[in-house]
Amino acid sequence: DSIKGPPDHNRYNGPHGIKDGFPKTFSTVLDCIFQSSAMTQGFFRRLAAQSNKYARKRMMEQHSTMFLGHKWTNISTAEMIRFFGIMLRISLEPRKMGGYASYFTEINIVNIGDDYSVELDTYTPWARDYMTLLRFKQIRSAFHPEAESSLCNDKCHQLRYFIRLFNSKAKEVFSLGRNVSFDEGGAAMRSRYCPVRMCNKDKPDKFRVDFFILADSDYRFIYHLDVYQGQNKANIDIDNTLIDFPTTQKAVANAIVKSGIANAIDGCRHIFMDNRYASPQLFALMNTSYNIRGVGTCKANRKGFDSDGLKVPNNSQRGTYARKVDDRLGMVITRWKDSRVLQIVSTVMKKGIGTVQRRVGKDKIDVRCPNDIIEYQKYMGGVDRGDQHRVVGAGFANVAHFKKWYKKAFLGICDFSFLQAFTVWNIGAKEAETNSNIRRDCILGKRRELLKWEFYSVAAKEMMTYTDESEAQKDESKAQKDEKTATQIEDNHHPIPIPRNSNMKAPTCMVCSMEEAVCLKVLNNGKGKVYSRRKKHLAICSVPNCNVVCHSCNPEESKIRKIPAFRGLSCFEIAHHPDCENLFIEVCRNGNTYTRSVLNHPVPKMITKIYEKELPRRSGRPRGRPKISNETKNQETPPIREIQARSSLITSADARSIISNITTTPPVTKPAKTATTTSTRAKKRNQNELSAARVINTRRSTRKKT
């Protein structure tokens, strides 16, 4: 009772809850999500634009106009909203087998044998009423928050825009009350490539991405959010005055500064945190610089905590405590024995000693406890209760499986946004019940509070059926065009995946096979790149009479794309190009029809020139030893010593003159069989001796050089 607490005139007395007039801005659950959370229509529009940019980038890398082997059309805002609605509905109805494809395909009847089949009641393909399976796969693969990489080494570049939008939207919607809690919340993460993955064996999810959350203790509304990055030298979105702080204390101080609650004009707020963040130094900074007081458990080895001055044995009775007060800083440190000894730091400094109930077996006992700790136990659960509400049950991140770690973390922030919208809806409904003016001004009149599964089910239904005005106009114009060009559509060539019941034994890409034949012909070594039989992206033509079988992309090994007319086209489009007319012919063998390429066509000739330019350069000088005619082989050669003796008498100048005479003499015609054959043989013998001497001299010169 002797502790002097903070003055009463400095307590917070400002607004608390959603801001005035905000419940009037929405009429449906989907409108509430658009208006009260970061998942606005502009958010979905930007997400669709970044996903389209990533898809185009990927298609350029593959030198194709196809995405996942099919024609690509840009994702619209309405399609992205419907995609999120389908994922939310899947989280409400998880299935243990079949994957997300089971929500699109008709598999509710299982054929076990002849006249034996079982119909599954719960496996209805409801998702195909809103989107095709192929389109869902394309959007799921192209879905990217950011198409480009970071320019400032930001580990969470893919999440940064969403986090900033989340924090700014929270300030527009909600006003924090007097009591605020700060803690971490997370999204489960198993990816080893995640640079911000944390491991905590005491959490329900051992591996996860942690988020620093500043939330209201009464309504559990998240007012500020940031992702834990460890010791990050980049310090993205960190106030310049807090760069040198320890990581966890920096997170608390930065949340206070960025959220705008520091030195508030409505008075002093109270913030509650656990021993991961609390320290006497941080609480002194909050009290003196930010006009914020707090209570938190503290580790015994924190700087500024006098562990030696506060002695509470472990075998002491429950309710035993020891306290120290610093009147200058307005701080009190306490050691209190509950089931174990706890350390508490407080600048709230609430007077008096109260009691708390603890269960011992079947009985309940009253334990003495300082009022500061009672306040901590009452208001600390704002983040934990909201995190429990978010994790248990439906949610985007609960059943989503992606190879990219940031997609799972991104969907975790979407769950935070849905928790905000759910809180705003129930607060607005409660205010509408008590306030007749709000109920009269609302578009739908009186609204009731919803349970979580009700709110999420209605949101999923409204998102799946969402249509945009521009999209409706496009559908009408498209229907009109389809009626006019119905005859033209039949003649268009489109790639179709090869059906499973096809009779093709070994389907081969016609364009790649033609290029492989040219490559083998030019290289002439029997070693060519074989990529024509890759089954991935292999397709047939939609026109029945067209026998084209080609890839819907252009493989990286192919060099046909270096031809200007074929640049950026897939193999399927190259096969239908006007320049490839009469390139492929049909050949009948043993009653079967095969497709064959004509190598005398201009296109194979252009490919041949491309490969010939890449051949290694070779000199025109003949390799190996000089060739000796058959006549000189049959003649007797002089001994080696005699040749060496003769060659030693020849100087380099004489050898050059002799060689020049030999090379400049015209070719000798074969003489007729006359009496002068002996003289011609003698001349040839001398020429052979000179050539042998020349070879020996060159060998000696090379040995001296080496």
Image: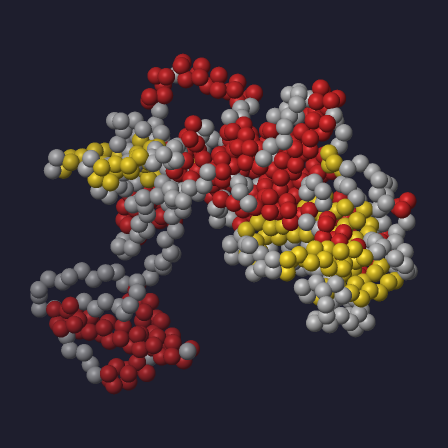
Q: Split into 4 quadrants, where in the image is the N terminus? A: bottom right
Q: Position of residue 125 (x, y in %)?
A: 39, 32
Left or right side of 88 for 496 = left
Residue at the front extreme, as displayed: 363
The residue depicted at 51 percent of the width and 29 percent of the height is: 461
**600 shown above or below 310:** above
Up-down relation of residue 490 to residue 403 (above or below): above
Q: Which residue is at 36% across, 40% downward?
A: 537
Q: Position of residue 432 (x, y in %)?
A: 70, 26
Q: Does residue 652 appear in the picture of this structure?
A: yes
Please name whichever residue, 690 or 598, is drawn nearer the observer in this view of the structure.
598
Q: Nearer the viewer, residue 108 or 239?
A: 108
| Residue 323: x %, y % from top left | 82, 64
In-image side of 50 versus 508 (left or right): right
Is residue 59 visible in this depiction of the protein?
Answer: no
Using the image, determine if residue 537 lies above or below residue 203: above
Number of labelled discs?
A: 0
Q: Which residue does the image show at 60% across and 29% down from the upper left?
A: 29
Q: Nearer the viewer, residue 342 or 44?
A: 342
Give the residue at x 27% y 27%: 544
Q: Quadrant of the C terminus?
A: bottom left
Answer with the quarter of the image where residue 285 lies: bottom right
Q: How is the image coloured?
A: secondary structure
- The image quadrant that residue 136 belongs to is top left
Q: Is residue 429 above or below residue 668?
A: above
Q: In this rendering, would 692 be left or right of 20? A: left
Q: Nearer the viewer, residue 379 or 417?
A: 379
Where does residue 293 sit, x and y in percent of width and height? 82, 52
Q: Quadrant of residue 295?
A: bottom right
